[in-house]
Image: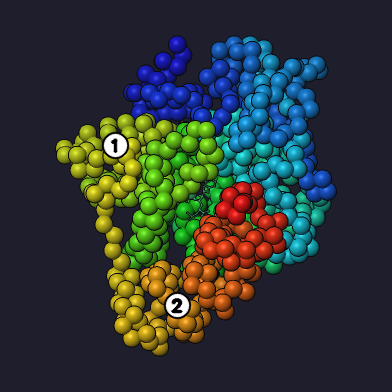
């Protein structure tokens, strides 16, 4: 009854999804969580953990404040590989009973805890396993400073349950406090208010006053220092990396200001970035108040900082208004890619945003070719690892859908609509269907003919790319097209250096080179542009992929070095795929992988294992 009531309210107030089952008609709960929020749901977490670098184990307790509105006798948590020692209710001295269900490879095991109708606190004492997929324990040699070990977590999509027993669904939110004990010489940071300073007793206290979903739980421990970039932004990094990082990200404050001007106040207090060791499997992860970032964005010329714009944008699209399930992932990433390019446009100008848009469109076309049925915006990842949804469909098809709406409605009307959406659904989780309803009542209904012009359901529920997709165009890239045409006609490389100035232009140039490219042509280009020696990871990835394809041997040593040092999946994947395409290449890949795999996070090696198996 209660939920029929809430669903009815939702019709009046638009999309709303907070700690309750989905009000939309597909009706099912999150297919990637065992939890039972309809019966009993978590509201707050007090976490107390000890970090042991010897055994690679976290141990302690998760004290959950719960709401049991239905007088349920059971609350269900998600766990994977956790050793549950005991569970206690409230102030009870006696333990309560619990069972761990059958294990699933991706989902882990449901932890069913016996509760009373009056229960408000459930304390779970537990230890993580050495294989906890969210955690990566690094030896000193795998860090920048080489002196201290390092630990970081990666909870998205469904890995939080490998280090915290939780209701691991993006539709369920809770506030948290944490106490984390670490070796005295190391600093701990979380997706929360951080202390900025080393605590000589090794005990760190954290507070996250906003309700967040479990996939945004994050912890890192290492030899870290903090440097502010302005009053509300700053950088955490290992001491040897910190000066470079603070320079690279010095314009973060401008980005936050630009973002606020577009879609309303930044609601999280501080915005800091933590630079991780190179094995971090993603470019960035939008952990609230503290984006986790790969050191490969530190190019030395600020050319890759749109990644920070992206993670910052998630402070609205994703962290404030959250996809209700991983099938709605495009709501997080498509909106964020749109917002990212708006921030880039505001801070770095229209030409820069246009170039990124064209590169995005190229990636999208490739992805459409590869992803078959998974080219619908609304995903269907039940029974699969939701990580499979991390493709250019969610990011770029999502982007172009929003761009198409912007074009049809006009930027001013669309901006007003988006700002309203972030306001109305702040700190809530939303399904695709709820978003569509909101779009219909708040934008399409107000504007005759708009709905037909856009064709919402085609974009969301059909494969491929609708024909009304907003066109893209970059004057800067047109000039590169002419350079490539000239080079093709003459085979002359002299002068390219003066005409290909920026990272985007070079990236576009590399991608525009013809399939028939030969190793000797690559050598001439390399002589002019010194690409093999580049320290820019985007350029390295694109160029080394060509080197493997066309057997350009002078780049092999650097390719190997890159694969051994960098753990970012987005770069590893195309390189290993290219290598695996020929028998000799595959043999070489396997040889490198032996050395490299211990440097990778599980998120990366699980994917590469598939390619090289
Ligand atoms: N939230 C994602 C990373 C993610 C997605 C982790 C799905 C696990 C599962 C993050 O915001 C992201 O999109 N990172 C990109 C950055 C890029 C698009 C600028 C990355 O890591 O490459
Ligand atoms: Zn993202």
Q: Quadrant of residue 160?
A: top right
Q: Is residue 4 above or below residue 344?
A: above
Residue 239 in the image: state x and y as whole percent.
70, 64
Residue that label 2 marks: 518
Quick one: SS at disc 2? loop
Residue drawn at x 53%, y 43% is 387
Q: Residue furthest front?
A: 583
Residue 547 in the image: state x and y as whole percent.
51, 72
Q: Is residue 240 above or below residue 411?
A: below
Residue drawn at x 26%, y 57% is 471
Mark nearest the camera among 1 and 2 is 2
Q: Nearer the viewer, residue 42 or 255?
A: 42
- What's the colour scheme? rainbow
Residue that label 1 marks: 457
Q: Nearer the viewer, residue 346 or 294?
A: 294
Q: Is the N terminus in the top left, top right, bottom left or bottom right quadrant? A: top left
Q: Nearer the viewer, residue 155 or 373?
A: 373
Name the disc covering residue 258, or none: none
Left or right for 436, reference 447: right
Q: Nearer the viewer, residue 122 or 202?
A: 122
Q: Is residue 22 visible?
A: yes
Quick one: SS at disc 1? helix
Residue 410 in the image: state x and y as whole percent.
23, 49
Q: Is residue 90 visible?
A: no
Left or right for 338, reference 215: left
């Amino acid at each position: 009854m209660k939920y029929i009531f809430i669903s009815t309210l939702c019709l009046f107030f638009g999309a709303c999804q907070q700690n309750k089952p989905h009000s939309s008609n597909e009706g099912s709960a999150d297919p990637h969580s065992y939890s039972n929020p309809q019966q009993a749901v978590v509201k707050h977490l007090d976490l107390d953990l000890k970090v042991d670098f010897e055994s690679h184990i976290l141990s302690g307790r998760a004290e959950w404040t719960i709401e049991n509105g239905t007088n349920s006798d059971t609350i269900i948590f998600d766990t994977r590989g956790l050793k549950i020692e005991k569970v206690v209710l409230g102030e009870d001295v006696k333990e309560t009973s619990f069972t761990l269900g059958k294990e699933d490879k991706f989902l882990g095991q449901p932890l069913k805890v016996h509760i009373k109708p009056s229960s408000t606190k459930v304390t779970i004492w537990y230890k993580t396993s050495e294989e906890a997929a969210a955690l990566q324990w690094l030896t000193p040699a795998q860090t920048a400073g080489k002196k201290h070990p390092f630990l970081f977590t990666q909870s998205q999509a469904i890995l939080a349950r490998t280090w915290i027993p939780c209701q691991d669904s993006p539709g369920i939110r809770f506030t948290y406090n944490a106490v984390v004990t670490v070796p005295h010489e190391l600093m701990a940071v979380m997706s929360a208010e951080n202390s900025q300073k080393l605590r000589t007793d090794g005990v760190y206290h954290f507070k996250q006053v906003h309700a967040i979903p479990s996939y945004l739980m994050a912890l890192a421990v290492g030899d870290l220092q903090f440097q502010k970039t302005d009053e509300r932004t700053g950088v955490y990094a290992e001491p040897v990396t910190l000066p470079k990082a603070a320079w690279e990200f010095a314009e973060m404050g401008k980005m936050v200001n630009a973002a606020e001007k577009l879609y309303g106040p930044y609601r999280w207090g501080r915005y800091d970035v933590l630079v991780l060791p190179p094995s971090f499997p993603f470019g960035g992860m939008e952990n609230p108040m503290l984006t986790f970032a790969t050191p490969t964005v530190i190019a030395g010329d600020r050319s890759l900082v749109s990644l920070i714009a992206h993670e910052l944008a998630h402070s609205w699209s994703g962290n404030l208004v959250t996809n209700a399930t991983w099938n709605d992932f495009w709501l997080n990433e498509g909106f964020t890619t749109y917002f990212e390019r708006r921030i880039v446009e505001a801070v770095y100008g229209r030409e820069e945003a246009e170039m990124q848009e064209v590169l995005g469109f190229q990636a999208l076309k490739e992805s459409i070719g590869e992803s078959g049925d998974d080219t619908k915006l609304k995903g269907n990842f039940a029974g699969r690892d939701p990580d499979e949804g991390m493709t250019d469909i969610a990011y770029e098809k999502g982007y172009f859908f929003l761009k198409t709406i912007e074009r049809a409605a006009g930027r001013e009307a669309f901006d007003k609509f988006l700002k309203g959406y972030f306001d109305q659904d702040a700190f809530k989780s939303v399904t695709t269907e709820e978003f569509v309803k909101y779009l219909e009542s708040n934008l399409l209904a107000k504007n005759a003919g708009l709905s037909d012009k856009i064709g919402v359901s085609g974009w969301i529920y059909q494969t491929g790319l609708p024909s009304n997709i907003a066109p893209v165009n970059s004057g800067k890239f047109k000039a590169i097209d002419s350079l490539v045409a000239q080079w093709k006609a003459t085979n002359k490389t002299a002068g390219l250096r003066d005409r290909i100035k920026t990272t985007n232009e070079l990236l576009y140039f590399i991608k525009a080179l013809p399939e028939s490219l030969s190793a000797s042509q690559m050598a001439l280009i390399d002589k002019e542009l010194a690409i093999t020696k580049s320290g820019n990871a985007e350029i390295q990835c694109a160029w080394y992929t060509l080197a493997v394809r066309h057997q350009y041997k002078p780049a092999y040593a650097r390719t190997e070095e890159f694969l051994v040092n960098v753990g970012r999946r987005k770069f590893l994947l195309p390189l290993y795929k290219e290598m695996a395409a020929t028998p000799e290449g595959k043999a070489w890949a396997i040889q490198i992988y032996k050395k490299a795999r211990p440097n990778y996070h599980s998120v990366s090696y699980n994917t590469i294992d598939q390619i090289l198996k």
